[in-house]
Amino acid sequence: MKPREICAGVHWVGAVDWNRRLFDALIPLPDGTSYNAYLVQGLEKTALLDTVDPAMESVLASHLANVARIDYVVAQHAEQDHSGCLPFILQKYGEAQVVCTPKAKALLVDHVDIAPERIITVEDGETLALGGKTLRFVYTPWVHWPETMVTHLPEDRILFSCDFFGSHIATSDLFAGNDPYVLEAAKRYYAEIMMPFRKMVQKNLVKVREMDFDFIAPSHGPIYDHPEGILSAHEDWASDRVSNLVVIPYISMHGSTETLVNYLVAALIERGIKVQKFELSTTDIGKLAMALVDAATIVIGTPTVHLGPHPSVFSATHLANALRPKLKYAAIIGSYGWGTKAVEQISDLIPNLKVEVLGTVLCKGFPRAEAFAALESLADTIGKKHAAL
Ligand code: FEO
């Protein structure tokens, strides 16, 4: 494929990874992804903004086949899906210098084995003139790593945002337009990648709002040519607002926990509460993460296995804790055969969740009237809490 023009002197030279299905050996990519690199050619200097995942080096090489000189490689973020082809670029273009934050310099030396003498660092707000085009670097820590920055190109009104505002989609579309599917993918991406850093997302959104641009060009997914939609969506997702939603990740071995979950789902619906339940042996954890972006309450459902929660529940609970969603309330329901420490063990898994625990409903064996009455009471409590949101 040839480089794709965004505007005069600015081209997309990245790679679309249609077949990738897992990121970090953890995050499902049902729709693949892209690693976006951008070539900015001024009257005097040429800069490459980021590279691509090492698996796609040949694609980047083909895009740059007719590019004789690169003066600067801006490494906005040190993670290897963007920095992994820096060695190839530095070898091909012997004059090129890497431009990054001081924190990124240390990470690039450690993680990608870049020679320190090839790296120049920039301060927050510093500019780099290319001749008729100016790159202005703005620190945006923790979207995604502590060293990350974005790059503003004021002459062409483009914000190159790196991981910030990204979406994991493989698409032939260069621009997102108003495609709601892109917004859905961006929410999944936010949930999986950015939600743990929600407070930093809030701060970085304020910094981004201070810049003038017509395009947001992220490092994953299509370019936003109507950026207000993705900006306001992020402001909503990262806000402290929660919705009238209960998320129930659960698993059942012999049907008892499933019965409890289904009873509670019906009881919550009767009280006007939205519910999303996720059966953990089959669920897409990306969908679960998305539900946690807005949910007010999580109810964890588990049978007891060797005194503790089922391993799938253990794993999902650990993940929910790591994602740090803005949940306000939690409860645990489930069943056991003869004894259980499931509640204690689950409680120990969620120190990051600043939730009020609304109760637990555990039953020995198959649930009976007493358990159903406890679920009615739990649904009442959740209903009152949600009414006050
Ligand atoms: Fe797309 Fe944090 O790397």
Image: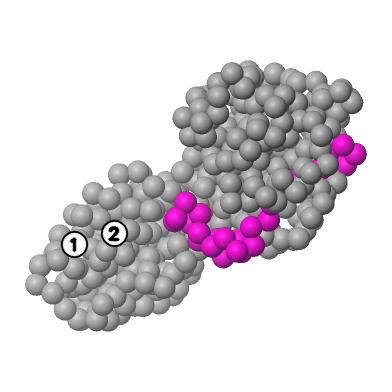
Q: At 44% across and 55% down in the image, what residue appears?
A: 25
- Can residue 342 be seen here? The reply is yes
Classify 10 Å Cα crowding around label 1: few (below 14), some (14-19), many (20 and above): many
Q: At 78% across and 38% down in the image, what residue appears?
A: 39
Query: How far across and how far down the image is residue 256, in percent?
Result: 25, 79
Q: Amino acid at mark 2?
A: Phe
Quarter of the image where one finds residue 311: bottom left
Residues 310 and 64: in front is 64
For residue 105, above or below residue 305: above
Q: Is residue 8 magenta?
A: yes
Whether residue 45 sits left or right of residue 170 in the image: it is right
Residue identifier under label 1:
308
Query: How far across and how far down the image is residue 285, in percent?
Result: 45, 62
Whether tag 2 and tag 1 are in contact, CB under 8 A, the answer is: yes
Farthest-out residue, left:
338
Q: Which residues are magenta?
A: 7-32
Q: At 67% across and 60% down in the image, what residue appears?
A: 170
User: Which quarter shows the N terminus?
Assistant: bottom right
Q: Amino acid at mark 1?
A: Gly
Mark 2 and mark 1: Cα distance apart in space: 9 Å
Residue 10 — which label?
A: none
